[in-house]
Amino acid sequence: MASKKYTLLVAVLVMLQIAGNAQTKTDWGWDWKDSSKVPTKSIPQYNEFLNNQFPFPPKPRNAWELGLSLGTAFVIGDRPLFTKNSAGHGYNGGPSIGLSLRKALGHVVSLRGSAVYSSISIPSYSKGTTFITSGSNNSLALSLDALFSLNTISYYRANPKTNWYVLAGASLVGTQVKARQPDGKLLLVNFPNDKVVFTSNDLNYIHMVDLGAGVAFKLSPKWNLGLEQKFSIPTFGNDNLDGYKKAGANRGDFFSYSSIRINMNLGVKNK
């Protein structure tokens, strides 16, 4: 009986070894034996690691990441996202497309600059004696965000394929808002001077704070696919983004961006 137990234990160990070798062949993490991925300034630490004089290998080089985002933008304001009533029906949103460039500062924090264009259709809405006319919002957001990875605390875990993150940053948004008049024409909405940075070429430029979260799934060493939800909130409040300013106290309007992202690591080859 004892010999059977030892035989089973040896079989389990052999299976674990085979599984480990199989995973190594498809490992999309950093190969610590590849010295070409070590920055020149970190070679001393790398040599100490190889000679068992330091417990961890140095941080490897990291590539710039170029991203393309496609999704939906909403104005969260004075009407529901979806309306169905006698005044009309529609969807208070529209397509958004963006480009981004990201660079890691360390294991956890990275910086990402991006430009996102959105074209939002705003339906009319009525409830009781309240009627809000339809309109549109076309905006270009230039953002600089810090991304904080939530699952990289185990820096050198094997075969990492998923990255959960939260983000915070700032945006300068140039927006053009139009409201439909009784004769059917769309006219520009004038923003109060104290709610904009400046106005030029029918665009109102607004400072905004960015907050959001997302997840990225590694497809290969070069490509990853992500999902992200981001909110851009006017720094000093603004109730004009949906073309309707509500009388009295109001929390103001802000943007919501829901997107799918495809990201490419520049200078990295697929295995």
Image (tube, helix red, strand yellow):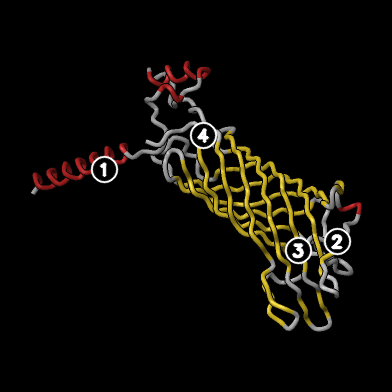
Query: Which one is earlier in the sequence, the residue at label 3 or at label 2?
Result: 3
Helix, strand or loop for disc 4: loop
Query: Which one is earlier in the sequence, the residue at label 1 or at label 4?
Result: 1
Q: Amino acid at mark 4?
A: Leu
Q: Amino acid at mark 2?
A: Val
Query: Which one is earlier in the sequence, the residue at label 4 or at label 3?
Result: 3
Q: Is residue 206 left or right of residue 22?
A: right
The x, y position of residue 73, in whole percent, is 66, 59
The x, y position of residue 39, in whole percent, is 50, 21
Q: Is residue 62 left or right of residue 117?
A: left
* Marks 4 and 3 close (CB-CB < 8 Å): no
Residue appearing at x 67%, y 58% in the figure: 256
Mark 2 surroundings: few (<14), some (14-19) or many (≥20) residues within 10 A: many
Residue 80 - label: none
Residue 136 - label: 3
Residue 266 - label: 4
Whether 236 is drawn above or below 34: the answer is below
